[in-house]
């Protein structure tokens, strides 16, 4: 079994400890101080963070001999599995998205593109997250954990827990659903023999989620919809982005 290089240990610690802790801290800050970052700047921050983190994962993969972009077309079964996932996940997500908007949950204000600029940023964010999160979690992190544990199921389970907690900023009630999604992505990757199908499915799901939130926000009269702030009276001047540490992986589930 191949050894884990120093860069691999850094990757394991960063995405397995630092990112989840940052997500927990952000979730507590949101609950305690009742503010959200300005949405357009939030989209830009997601783009920048995930691009940097993805580049880090690609470099770590190179130093650790991990192949994350094989030259092989996914088998038909994996493509069908990806379609089946979307056929189940989107209707399930729709019920959760509707419920969250009806209940006026504040966090969903970050997932509602309200104009052409925000829509373009959302598409870019979804694409980068779909590509980057799969490369990081189902690609590099999974391969490193497999080297440490020597067991596929154990490595996948640890990775699912790390990934789910890294999304804690969305609220602990969402972590359970996110863990199921993460496990499904691992299965798709296993069936594919590569990350490509999972990347495409992840992107499509996030894309649909954002525009569904926007549609539901307009339809159900979400507070402040159409304003670039959170819609709950917090202003950028009162709550600068520097006060809220929001790590990567904050796409809606």
Image (cartoon, rainbow, N blue to C red):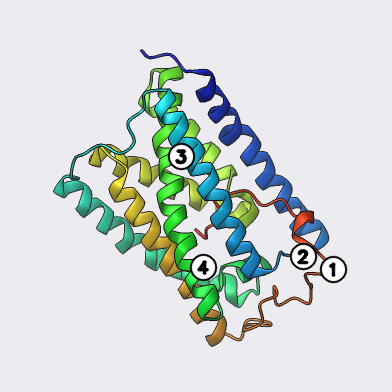
- Whether residue 208 is situated above or below residue 20 in the rendered picture: below
The foreground one among 162 and 193 is 193
Q: Tell me the CA gap for discs 3 and 2.
A: 29 Å
Considering only order in the chain, which callout, 2 or 3, is on the residue closer to the N terminus?
A: 2
Return the disc, 4 or 2, that comes first in the chain's sequence. Answer: 2
- Distance from Cα at disc 3 to Cα at disc 4: 21 Å
**Mark found first going from the N terminus, 1 or 4:** 4
Which residue sits furthest right? Answer: 238
Residue at numbered disc 1: 238
- Give the Cα distance between marks 1 and 4: 24 Å
Q: Which mark is residue 136?
A: 3
Does 195 sit left or right of 214 as displayed?
left
Residue under the image location 25 percent in, 58 percent down: 83
- Label 2, residues with CA under 10 Å away: few <14, some 14-19, many ≥20: many
Residue 203, horizontal then vertical, whole percent: 39, 58
Q: Nearer the viewer, mark 3 or mark 2?
A: 3
CB atoms of marks 1 and 2 within 8 Å: yes
The residue at which mark 2 appears reads as 35
Mark 3 or 4: the one toward you: 4
Q: Nearest the camera: 94 or 141?
A: 141
**Residue 1: in sight, yes or no?**
yes
Kindly indicate the quadrant of the structure image that contains residue 62. top left
* Real-space CA distance between mark 4 and mark 2, rounded to the nearest whole angstrom: 21 Å
| Residue indicated by mark 4 | 121
Q: Which quarter of the image is occupied by the N terminus?
A: top left
Secondary structure at badge 3 equals helix
* Element at label 4: helix
Q: Earlier in the sequence, mark 1 or mark 2?
A: 2
Farthest-out residue, left: 76
- Alpha carbon of mark 1 to alpha carbon of mark 2: how far? 9 Å
């Amino acid at each position: 079994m191949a050894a884990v290089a120093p860069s691999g240990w850094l990757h394991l610690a960063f995405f397995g400890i630092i990112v989840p802790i940052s997500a927990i801290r952000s979730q507590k800050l949101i609950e305690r101080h009742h503010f959200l970052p300005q949405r357009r700047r939030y989209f830009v921050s997601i783009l920048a963070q995930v691009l940097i983190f993805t580049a880090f994962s690609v470099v770590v993969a190179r130093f650790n001999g991990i192949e994350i972009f094989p030259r092989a077309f996914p088998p038909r079964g994996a493509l069908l599995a990806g379609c089946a996932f979307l056929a189940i996940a989107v209707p399930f997500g729709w019920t959760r998205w509707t419920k969250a908007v009806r209940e006026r949950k504040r966090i969903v204000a970050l997932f509602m593109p309200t104009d052409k600029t925000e829509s373009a940023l959302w598409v870019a964010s979804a694409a980068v997250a779909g590509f980057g999160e799969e490369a990081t979690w189902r690609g590099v992190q999974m391969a490193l954990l497999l080297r440490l544990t020597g067991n596929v199921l154990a490595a996948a389970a640890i990775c699912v827990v790390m990934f789910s907690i890294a999304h804690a900023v969305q609220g602990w009630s969402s972590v359970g659903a996110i863990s199921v999604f993460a496990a499904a992505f691992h299965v798709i990757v296993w069936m594919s023999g590569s990350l490509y199908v999972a990347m495409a499915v992840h992107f499509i799901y996030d894309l649909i989620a954002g525009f569904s939130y926007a549609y539901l926000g307009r339809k159900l009269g979400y507070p402040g919809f159409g304003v670039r702030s959170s819609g709950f009276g917090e202003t950028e001047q009162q709550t600068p982005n520097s006060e809220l540490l929001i790590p990567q992986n904050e796409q809606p589930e």
